[in-house]
Amino acid sequence: MLQVGISRQIITPERGVSLAGYFNPRPNTGALDDIHVKVVLFKKDSVVTGLVSFELVYANLELVDGVKSKLNAKGYDFADNLIIAATHTHTGPDLRSEKGGLNDKQFASMADKAVCAIEEAYANLQDATVESAKVNNNPCAFNRRYWMKDGTVQTNPGKLNPNIDRPEGPLDDEISILAIRQDGRLTGIISNICNHNDTVGGNLVSAEWPGRMEKEIQYELGCDVPVLTLIGCSGNINHFDVSNDSDQTCYAEACRIGKVYSEIIVGMLDILEPVEVDKIQVNSSDFVIPFQFISDERVTEAKATIERIGNVSADEDMTSEGIAAGSGPVAKMFAEQLVAFKDECSGKSRTFKLVNIKMGKDLMFLCAPGEPFTEAGLHIKENSPFKYNFISSYGNGTCGYMCMPECYERGGYEILPVVGGGPERDTLMRLMTAWDELVSK
């Protein structure tokens, strides 16, 4: 019989650790709510696999490899079967000490807490049944790239902007859930939703809308059922509704979105269908992602931009809306990033582990590093032989935005190279091919 184990550990950082997600430092001054690393393990016969989800902006390769190496050292043999992902909260600790984030000791503790949660989940393995459901109903998500009336494309062009023509691309409005039952009761929920997790801003720690969604679900159910959320392919998706002028960068917005999603998910519990898991099959492959090549001419242009703008600084956080506005500080920041990218990244590549978990004939999990555009997720769902497809962005590392090839000539800030991001232009199409090969095995 299928066995499932569930656990979590609090990873809320110490006061003063800078938060990740924007380009300016944000030393945190406390927490609105705790953040966690959550684990769900599955075991069938001798195969152990599962999901590890950090409530962080990403789980970089150093963190992923650290967790795996610690597991291996303790004698566990399933580390490479795991999808180690992040919820992409923009109000969790920065993993880089040079940016005011976690120091070496704190970083090691982050990995240790994940290993502790995995060990607890393994110890908690017990017989379980699983049920799944999906609906096409995502009222809080929007394609954030828009064709403007002048023929250009802008990311987050601003609310009530009269120059907006139409969204550039599609929206994956599917929400999927997997319900876990043990000893006759609901013991866990896995949700898969396409939406950016950047609603709060500021300098207070928060799990943002996935954390609030879990609280609302628990309130409605009357017990603390753990909810692990996988963020779908959302590189060009967020929560900004440009048709109104409401404030959508605040904690109240995270609470609103969390409540909307909780109502949808609680309603889905009435349409669950049993999923038979007669076997578990885990396939994986190495996926090499080169960085973009930056010419000397682009560096010269960037240095000229830096000199022209001069000594300016942003007074507020460089949020997605502020970046889209392209003010002087933002233009200078991207120019500085390009120069640094040329020195640190251009001409190099990274290798990520793609993992595909097949459970029976109807259910599968699939991951990708970084932020693939939503077209990739739609491609898999349209072509997959599985009824329920849980796709996780920010899985087993981060590589930045993976855009559709045509987007690079149109504009928007996702295409711009920044240190640690900036994959080659063909990355998303190669990812879809690699995914197809994994799913077909």
Image (cartoon, rainbow, N blue to C red):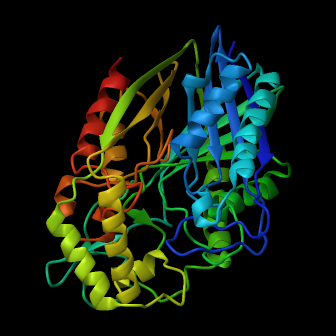
Relative to the observer, which residue lies in front, 372 or 3? 372
Which residue lies at the image location 73% right of the left edge and 31% below the top edge? Answer: 118
Left or right? Give the position of 216 relative to 139.
Answer: right
Give the x, y percent position of residue 57: 56, 57
Q: Quadrant of residue 149?
A: bottom left
Q: Is residue 229 above or below residue 389?
A: below
Which residue lies at the image location 47% right of the left edge and 49% below the top edge? Answer: 232
Left or right? Give the position of 38 relative to 261.
Answer: right
Relative to the observer, which residue lies in front, 136 or 16? 16
Residue 60 in view in this figure: yes
Relative to the observer, which residue lies in front, 22 or 420? 420
The number of callouts visible is: 0
Which residue lies at the image location 75% right of the left edge and 38% below the top edge? Answer: 112
Give the x, y percent position of residue 439: 37, 25
Q: Quadrant of the N terminus?
A: top right
Q: Quadrant of the C terminus?
A: top left
